[in-house]
Every structure is written in C-alpha cells, then in structure tokens.
Image (spheres, rainbow, N blue to C red):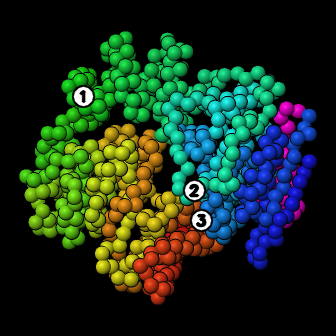
Amino acid sequence: MLISRIDRQPARREPLVLAVFSFRHDAHLVPGLLANIAPLVHGHVAWEDCDAETALSSEPMRRNLLLAEARRLGARWILAVDPDERFEDRFAARLPEMLALGEGNLWHFNLCEMFSPRAWRSDGVWGGKSQMLLFPAAAIGAELSVPLHAGWVAEGDGFMQRAAGVNLYHLRMATPTRRRARRALYAAADPERQFQRIGYDYLDDERGMVLTPIPEGRGFSPAFVEDHGLWAVDPGMVGTPVPDPLEARLAYVAQAAAKAGQAAAFHAMQDLCAASPADDDLPHVAASLALTAGLLPEVEALTGAMLARDGADLHARMLRARARLRAGQSAGAAEDIASLARALPDCALVADLSADLARPGADFTAPFAQWRRWVAGAAECCEGTGVATAEIAVIVLGFRAQPELAEAVASLLAQDAAAEIVVVNSGGGAPEAVLAAHLDRIRLIAVEEPLRVGAARNIGIDAARAPIIAFLAGDCTAAPGWVSGRLARHRAGAATVSTPVLAMPGAGLVARAANRLKYWVRSPTTPLAEVSHFGRSYPRWLFAEVGAFPPGLQVAEDDALNRLADTVAAPPVWAPEIGTRHRDPARLWQLLADHRARGERRASHPPFRAMAGKADATARLAADMAARLRGGWRAVDSDPALSPPARWAMKLVQWLAARADRSGVAAALNRLA
C-alpha cells in the first residue's frame, strides 16, 4: 500500500524534498526514522509491504512505485532511506549547501554499519561503503529492474557523483544475531552470488575487525533503543543458505585488501589455504596480506613453511626479509637479503632491502648513495657533525635556496623534541650560505637541477635514517610542539598524521584572509567531517608498501601517494594541535595574482577538468567556487579574536580572491575545451 504525506511546504525558492522508503518487518522503526529525517524533508512517500504474500517482495517494483509517486507530488529532490537507518544530525545544516550546488549532482553518504549501538566497523570493505541516496528527480530515467543491491538511479550519465561527507548509520548489523540472519537471508536469496560479487560470508565474520566509535558531534537522533529483534523475514522462508563459492571469497579478499582491510583479508585467505592445501600460490597471497597488516609472526610462520618446502622460493624469502626488517631482526634479515642478492644480483627490490638494512650506518655522502637514483645531474650531500639521531626525520623542501629556508630549519631546531633534519634544495642557489648558521646540525642535499616536489620528497626519504618521516616546505615554519605532537600521535597508534595550516605570527589582514580561504579544510577549527588530510607524517614501512611519491607530477604528488596509503593503512589521524605556519601574500594585488594562477593550475585536475566543454560548466564552476568561499567565511567566523570590521574586511578580500580563482579556472577550462 502506497502512503504519501506532505508535512510542510517549502519556502520561497526552496525545492521540494521528499523521502522515500518501504517497510514490513521493520515497521516499528518507522517513527524513529521519521523523527530523524523531519528536519531534512518536506514529506515522504512510503510503501507498506506488510500484506505481501511472498517472503520477499520485488524491490524494483517497490522502488519504481515510490519514485513515480514522488515525482507526481512535485519532488525536485528525493532522499532514499530505510527504517533501520539514521542520518547524522549535522546533515540538516549541510543540506542547503548541497542543494545549492545544483541538480546535476548525485550525493553519496558514508554507510556506517553499526556493530554495536555506538560504534561501526571500519576496516576493509566496511570502511569504504557508501550509498547514493540524495538525487534530483531529473535523474530518474529507465525503470529499475535489478532484483537485489541496485541503486536508486538506473543510469547516472551526465551527473556528477559527489560525496556528502555525511554519515548514515545502519542499525541492522548492531547485534551478532542480526548479522548472522542477514548473511543467511542474502545467501539464500542469491545462491549464485549474481548480485554481490564478494558474496555474503563476510557479513558475520569478525576476524580482523576494527570498530570506530561515533565521533563527538556526529551522532544521530532520536537515540536508538535496542530491541534485539531480527527486523527481517526468517531466512528459512526464502531458501537454503549456501556458503560463498571460491570466486566470491577471492573477490572479497581483493576488495578488503584494497581498502585497508588486510587483516580481515588475511584470515579469509587462511581459510582458503586450509581448504586447498595443495595450492602453492595461496600461502604467498596470505603472507603478503599479513605483512601489510603488520602481522609479523604470521609472516614468519607462513614463509618459514614455504621455504621448508622449497628453499629457492624467492618471493617467500623476500617477504620474510621485509618482515624481519620491520620487526628489527637485522641478523635474520641480513641472511635472507644475502641469499636474495646472490640469486638476483641486479634486482632493484633487493637493492632497496639492502639499503634499508644498511640505513643505520649508511654514508649518505657516498657517490652511489641510494638517494641519487632520483637525480640526473650534479648533486652533493653535506653532513653536519651534529645531525640528531631521532625517532622522526623532517625533510625540509627548498627551491633555489629561498631565504625563508633558514627560518624553516630554525623552527625545527627550536622544537621541544629532537628531529633528524634533512634539507633537500633543488634548482641551485646558495643553500650553504642561506643555512650557514645551521649546517652543523643538518644533512643538506643540494641538487643543481630543478626538481618537482615528489622527487625532492623521495630524496629526503632515502637520505634519512628515522622510522617516521615528516615534511616541511621551505616557505613554512613549524609551530611549537610540531615534532613532539607528531611523535605522540604515532606512538599512540596512528599510521599517518595530518595537520592544519596556520598564518604566520603577526600576519596582516590580507595574509590571514588568504590563509583561511585556502586552508579552511585544514584549520584547527575545521569540523572533522570536512577536514582534508594533508601535511601528513608517515611510518617508513608504508613507503615499502605503496612506493614513492610520483616524481614528475607538477601538483598533488602528496594526494597521489595518500590515496595509495589509505588502501593499506588505517585512516589518517587529524591532529589540530600541530600547526604548520605558512607564508601567504601580504598585499591584495599579490593575493589576486596568486589565486588567478592557482585557478589556472586547478583547471587541469578533478573536479574541474571534467567541466571543460560542458554546457553547464559556468553554473557548476560558480556553485563549486561558492562552496569554497562559504568555507573560507566559516573559518573567519570561527575566530573569536576577530572584530566585526575585521571579519567584514577579510570576507571581502576572500570574495575578491575567489573571483580571481574562478576567472583563472574558467580561462583554463576554455583552453582545455
């Protein structure tokens, strides 16, 4: 039975937003759902499925009816949801900005599968789940026909896929009983795994599980009260549940491993090893997953068994060497690396292992030092006698020996914790003269040719000894606590640590306005859901897993590596207390020229590049830039030290800078088109 209701009329120029959902065994959850979405929608369309004669009614039929009724009622936007789901409360404040970006967008939400009333599972496939649930009525095209796990829009051609940055909490998985029932239900309804490639056995497999509590400020209401019901049909009424076939289990391993779920993937692969003991390839995959997950005793056991069967198994020996290096077992690692070097004398991977083994006593001034692989021309290393032996190395990136380089190094030497400091300067200049006061306490690598930032970063990684690596641009300084704060976060278990960007002490109004406009997603006051995780420090082992920074990219070399890092390591930890101070343009004309140039460079990268040649490019660009400007204004408003006139003036400066940025993007998009 179809139920529709308009609770309130939209305000002038406000689009009508309707929710759509269906219910049956979860009917008692509907009041809580309606209370949760009341601030978001003007009404809803629901399908009451309680009188269905079959165990499972047709999902496409229900959805097609709901969408048709929503359109008949005049909905411009549709929010799809289920009775067992709850949006975080902050969605209400975010929604107007999302709608303002126009009807060319399909909005995806972070799907948080609750494994307890207050925490969701975040490892592997669980942490990467998202659903497109907010879409314009104009996106509804062909009727839906896929029986299970399909989206609400059959085709999304011509629409931009966007992340809402909003959590959707799924309550059905909050108890082990419901998790088992859900697995059995889908395993019976989809015995051939036609509609979910990774199968369903993983739904109640808790091995390798990582739980993330709901962060402060990101909860939902009304509060959930657990009733321990199943909220679904008895799986036995649908059919006989069957276990996942081999192909589905391998697909699950691949997806979990690609989303920082190597521990869970390892356990699934161990099951496959036990089921197929004659398969010699499976233990190699299992050992690789265990190494990435940091399960070093498991790597030792697996590779030891493989080498006992075949002493010439070079892959097993390489995995064991890497595990032993990571565990600090130098003697055992040396034996494995020596064996590999005899079998593979010209292998770059073995050379990397040898360099890591020799790193504690390496001579970085030597003609064949590892860092020289990134340099084609003249370069030299000057080693000070007072370079610190520390847990963290900071790579300072200089270009043509800018005068600010000395201030960057001085800010590190003034920290309350020691750091190994490696300065990499490219493009010539006179870095020895600029850094004359600090040469005794740093390792300086001077490269004559200009380098892109990725290559300079890689040189620093190769020319440092510490197990944790951080970076500081030559036009920045480290605020007090920069080093000790990072160390504390890493010691507490963080894999990578991201940090905010601050204005320089004593910066004027223009510079502070520029800082808040460019770095509103990296401000100490930025809401965690909107944080952009840059300025990271990394454990050295991570580079062995994901490789080096792309040495040839003009921009976004850190974004490229971070995307890979986030597939093998835990999500980055935001540390708002660790400040990097950035020098911004002090005069308005300098700021406008800088933002015009930034806009021209930005046009070559997502999401702007996709706008080139599109009929609605101007509208999309205006909406996107307006969102950036609103972020800068919020950053200004969040500073209690600013007077009302200062806020007004800074917002005006930001508006002018945003206009310059937008004109730069538009001009470059026209050239691209």
Q: Which residue is mark 1?
A: 329
Sooner in the amino-acid sequence: mark 3 or mark 2? 2
Q: Which mark is residue 218?
A: 2
Q: How far is disc 1 from disc 3 in space, using C-alphas? A: 53 Å
Query: Contact (CB < 8 A) between labels 3 and 2?
Result: no
Please tell me in which quadrant of the rendered image residue 415 appears: bottom left
Sooner in the amino-acid sequence: mark 2 or mark 1? 2
Q: Position of residue 514 (x, y in %)?
A: 41, 76
Q: Nearer the viewer, residue 497 or 103?
A: 497
User: Is label 2 in a helix, a strand or a loop?
Assistant: loop
Q: Nearer the viewer, residue 24 or 475?
A: 24
User: Is label 3 in a helix, a strand or a loop?
Assistant: helix
Q: Nearer the viewer, residue 40 or 224?
A: 224
Q: Which residues are magenta?
A: 54-78
Query: Mark 2 packing: few (<14 Cα in 10 Å), some, or many (20+)?
Result: some
Q: Is residue 505 left or right of residue 183?
A: left
Q: Amino acid at mark 1?
A: Gln
Q: Which residue lies at the image location 19% right of the left edge and 63% below the top edge?
A: 414
Residue located farthest toward the left when viewing the structure as drawn: 385
Badge nearest the viewer, 3 or 2:
2
Q: Which residue lies at the image location 43% right of the left edge and 23% below the top edge?
A: 284
Q: How far is disc 2 from disc 1 in space, using C-alphas? A: 43 Å
Q: Is residue 413 left or right of residue 527?
A: left
Q: Position of residue 368 (x, y in %)?
A: 16, 42
Q: Amino acid at mark 2?
A: Arg
Please tell me in which quadrant of the rendered image residue 100 appears: bottom right
Query: Mark 3 packing: few (<14 Cα in 10 Å), some, or many (20+)?
Result: many
Q: Which residue is mark 3?
A: 611
